Amino acid sequence: MELDLTAFRPAERSTLQLRVLYEQAGYRKYRMARFEEYALYQQYESFLPDAQVVTFTDLDGKLRAIKPDVTLSIAKNAQPAPGTCKKYYYTEQVCRPSRESHTFTEISQMGLECLGTVGSAEQAEVIRLAAQSLAALGAPGVMELGHMGFVTALLDGIGAAKADRPALLALLQEKNPHGLRQAAQKAGLPEEGIDALAELLTLNGPLTQTLAAARSCCRYPGQREALDELTALQNDLGEAARGARLDLSLAGDMEYYNGLVFSGYLSGIPRAVLKGGQYDLLIRRFTPGACALGFALYLDELERLEAPLPPVREGETDGNRWLNIALPKGRLGDKAYALLAGAGYGAGDYNDTRKLVIENPDARVRYFLVKPSDVAIYVEHGAADVGIVGKDILSESGADVYELMDTGMGRCRMCVAGPKNFADDESRALRVATKFVNIARAHYEQTGRDIDIIKLNGSIELAPILGLSDVIVDIVETGTTLKENDLAVLEEFMPISARFIANKASYQFKRAAIDALLGSMKEALEQ
């Protein structure tokens, strides 16, 4: 009897299909132990997606961990002999902390690893299998390629210090041009180098055209070598490269990836379902001189493909896509809507209705009117494609989105404030009252100051007045409230304004519409 794959759920169906694909390509199933000695993860913590690991003491007295990663264990155990190449695929559960639930959660992964002598043919094979994997998942997909060598050669050439690079890479990953320039200036980079970094954000589009554009702005030999490798990969892939995109700001962790990096997106899923890259730096800790390339598919994400379209989106097709915009209610929302209407994307007077969803069918835009603190959540999870949100809310939430523009609206600053005569007693923990817990913690971690955070939701200025805290971390616009309560700004550390953000998957599938809106908004701001 022929097996009916339609009877299976998306993750189960995909697992069966991909096993056949990988076996036919010469990859063999790798079965690893559920637990690993914790010492391995402790020693190679910088190669893990998160330093937090679930540990327990086994019956033999050894401290073990529920595995948070597959690649590290495979790299440790593969040990390919010189001149050979080992090829594995796997289907495993890993345990990682969830930012949404604030608990550890199991994640279903399927992927493959190619380790040892990895040349251009092996690179092309892995990328081809990644593209075929994406195509087998039952929804329109986009493959996006990048190369860490292009980015690191530029950082080397412009003299970026090692300590400054993680922040610069994070801003590249956010597609955040304004933040990137500010960070580069703070790092003391030359103006020409700052322009070159910002230029990386424009090197994004169809593979062939973007390769040509990148050639014209190469500055250093390492960048040319990266482009040569990408060109050879394109030639080796042939038809398999059709539809692939190149994004030379697609940067990963410099301690992990050293060459090709790539991601895969599916229509209807708000985040990447496939991630991979070249990780020679890790494999060489166990096998000197070896190379490694691989990717992982996040199978749990595929369950979203079964969900029906929400009522508000019924009738949409790939050829009839609307742009869904999360708009904050209140004063910022009024300013944001005025900007969008001035850019030609108005939908009537939204203050004249009690509706939470308003539309402009001619412009194919739909507004969701949400609480300001929820905008980033709606965008990150794909309920909205884009949105306008204050930098304070965006930073506090840690939302994984693209920050495409600083609109300049609602300018203020995040400050440390306290009594005018405040003198810090460094012999004890500093008591800090705030509603911006994550922002405050990150700020003081940079200085190494020990703090106790007291979370408040309103009237933050009362805390030092009543002795509840030593200082506060809060937004300051005019400073009038502080002055009237005999408080003063002690330190300014973050400029705040409204930012235009985009969901990462929406940016792949609705790029033209998002870029058009972004361009119209910039023109409206300049008038």
Image (cartoon, grey):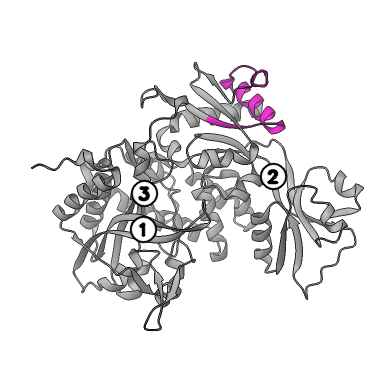
Q: In the rendered structure, which amino acid carries the disc numbered 3?
A: Asp
Q: Is residue 20 above or below residue 319?
A: below
Q: Give the range drawn in magenta.
A: 325-354
Mark 3–mark 2 distance (CA, rounded to whole Å): 36 Å
Q: Which quadrant does the N terminus fall into?
A: top left
Q: Spatial distance from mark 3 to mark 1, Cα to Cα?
A: 28 Å
Q: Nearer the viewer, residue 56 or 347?
A: 56
Circle number at residue 1: none
Q: What element carries label 3?
A: helix
Left or right: 65 in relation to 194: left
Give how far across and how far down residue 63 sits, in percent. Answer: 42, 78
Q: Name the residue under label 2.
A: 496
Q: Which residue is the site of mark 1?
A: 259
Q: Main secondary structure of the magenta part?
A: helix
Q: Is residue 388 magenta?
A: no
Disc on the earlier residue, 2 or 1:
1
Residue identified by numbered label 3: 300
Tell which of 216 and 500 is nearer to you: 500
- Give the CA separation, mark 2 to mark 1: 35 Å
**Res. 336 image quadrant:** top right
The reply, left or right, for residue 251 in relation to residue 182 is left
Within 10 Å of disc 1 (Cα), the crowding (few <14, some 14-19, many 20+) is: many
Nearer-N-terminus badge (3/1) = 1
Amino acid type shown at disc 1: Gly
Q: Is 169 placed left or right of 117 in the picture?
A: right
The amino acid at mark 2 is Ile
Q: Can residue 145 be seen in this view?
A: no
Q: How many marks?
A: 3
